[in-house]
């Protein structure tokens, strides 16, 4: 499989290739620990690197259908609009 990398990554790859095999291993380990949310003292196990299993949606009964849930909305349990303040990121309202 051929992957096209951003030209901005080429200097990083070139620098990586100048490292010793041990330094490359240590860097990859550090990056994996970061991506997996591990502390530096925690060990990466092979099971952490396996692709995630396929998750399938559970079968639902009619009581959880959108139509059924919307039918349960009444004037007594319908709340008013909630003001969450001004946009703080790039969301558009």
Image: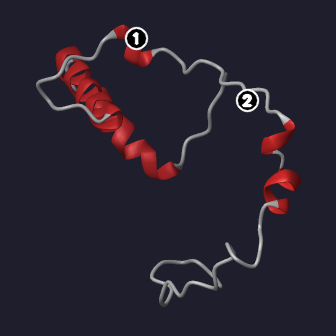
x, y (%) of residue 17?
A: 32, 27
Q: Is residue 18 visible?
A: no
Within 10 angstroms of label 2, few (less than 14), some, or many (20 or more) residues? few
Q: Secondary structure at mark 2?
A: loop
* Residue for point 67% across, 21% down: 1
The one of 82 and 39 positioned closer to us in this rendering: 82
**The C terminus: image quadrant:** bottom right
Whether residue 92 sits left or right of residue 68 in the image: it is: left
Q: Secondary structure at mark 1?
A: helix
Q: Which mark is residue 57?
A: 2
Quarter residue 60 falls in: top right
* Residue for point 54% across, 48% down: 6
x, y (%) of residue 47?
A: 40, 11
Whether residue 50 sits left or right of residue 69 in the image: it is: left
* Residue for point 34% across, 31% down: 36
Q: Which mark is residue 47?
A: 1
Q: Which mark is residue 56?
A: none
Whether residue 24 sits left or right of residue 88 in the image: it is: left
Q: Is residue 28 visible?
A: yes
State the separation of the CA atoms marked 2 and 1.
23 Å
* Residue for point 64% across, 85% down: 80
């Amino acid at each position: 499989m051929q992957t096209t990398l951003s030209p901005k990554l080429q200097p990083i790859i070139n620098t990586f290739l100048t490292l010793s095999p041990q330094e490359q291993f240590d860097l990859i380990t550090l990056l994996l620990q970061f991506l997996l949310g591990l502390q530096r003292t925690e060990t990466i196990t092979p099971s952490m690197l396996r692709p995630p299993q396929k998750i399938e949606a559970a079968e639902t009964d009619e009581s959880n259908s959108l139509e059924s849930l919307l039918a349960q909305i009444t004037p007594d349990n319908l709340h008013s609009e909630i003001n969450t303040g001004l946009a703080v990121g790039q969301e558009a309202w």
